[in-house]
Amino acid sequence: DTAVSQTPKYLVTQMGNDKSIKCEQNLGHDTMYWYKQDSKKFLKIMFSYNNKELIINETVPNRFSPKSPDKAHLNLHINSLELGDSAVYFCASSQEGGQGREQFFGPGTRLTVL
Amino acid sequence: RKEVEQDPGPFNVPEGATVAFNCTYSNSASQSFFWYRQDCRKEPKLLMSVYSSGNEDGRFTAQLNRASQYISLLIRDSKLSDSATYLCVVQKAAGNKLTFGGGTRVLVKP
């Protein structure tokens, strides 16, 4: 009965590879997000989707491409992985956009690029 | 200057003591404020929202000072289980984007 789930939990890969991380939420929320938490622990938003539409796209290399097949899923595909992509990636969801909405986070995907 | 700044700590707190720490934000148009808690190698979870008049949730008290653009968190009667990183989070008026501080690490020791 996990609210926000991500797969895989750990991902170790070589530079230059392409990988995907999947996220699903069963909370019935309309908005989903991808965050990156780097080694210094800063959590930064990358993308936000509301009802499958992209609403936030921070300055992220275009090697990162989110895809939302439906409002319960938001996947992240990364092309040509670089060393600097190593981080923990968190998916989150919240009720329809507005002020003061709690965001629920998935358990994170720890990506290591060698 | 970072949008949301926090003292990274760690704050070493004896069990049962009180600890307080602040967070400053740079955007005066910020509308909503939160404290999230993140345990080691876990995801962030909402601890409490911060309201203009200040609010309390059990042993936790949050305050907002809009004039000086900071929020604070006070933990009374600290428990070992309070050991975590506390993330200050600010939300702007437009959209749902949350901006996180780097976190303040609290270690409660017996």
Image (cartoon, coloured by chain):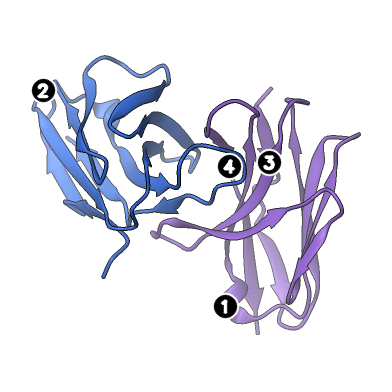
Q: Mark 1 — residue?
A: B81
| 4 or 3: tag closer to the N-terminus | 3
**Rendered image quadrant of residue A20:** top left
> Where is B95 relative to B14, above or below?
above
> Where is A16 relative to B73, above or below?
above
Residue A92 at x, y percent in the picture: 38, 46
Q: Nearer the viewer, mark 2 or mark 1?
A: 1
* Chain B visual colour: purple
Q: Mark 4 — residue?
A: B102
Q: Mark 3 — residue?
A: B32
* Chain A visual colour: blue
> Which chain is mark 3 on?
B
C-alpha span from label 4 to label 3: 18 Å
> Which chain is mark 4 on?
B
Amino acid identity at mark 1:
Ser
Q: Nearer the viewer, mark 4 or mark 3?
A: 3
Q: Mark 2 — residue?
A: A16
In front here: A87 or B3?
B3
Q: Are marks 1 and 3 in contact (CB under 8 Å)?
A: no
| 1 or 3: tag closer to the N-terminus | 3
Amino acid identity at mark 2:
Gly
Count of picture labels: 4
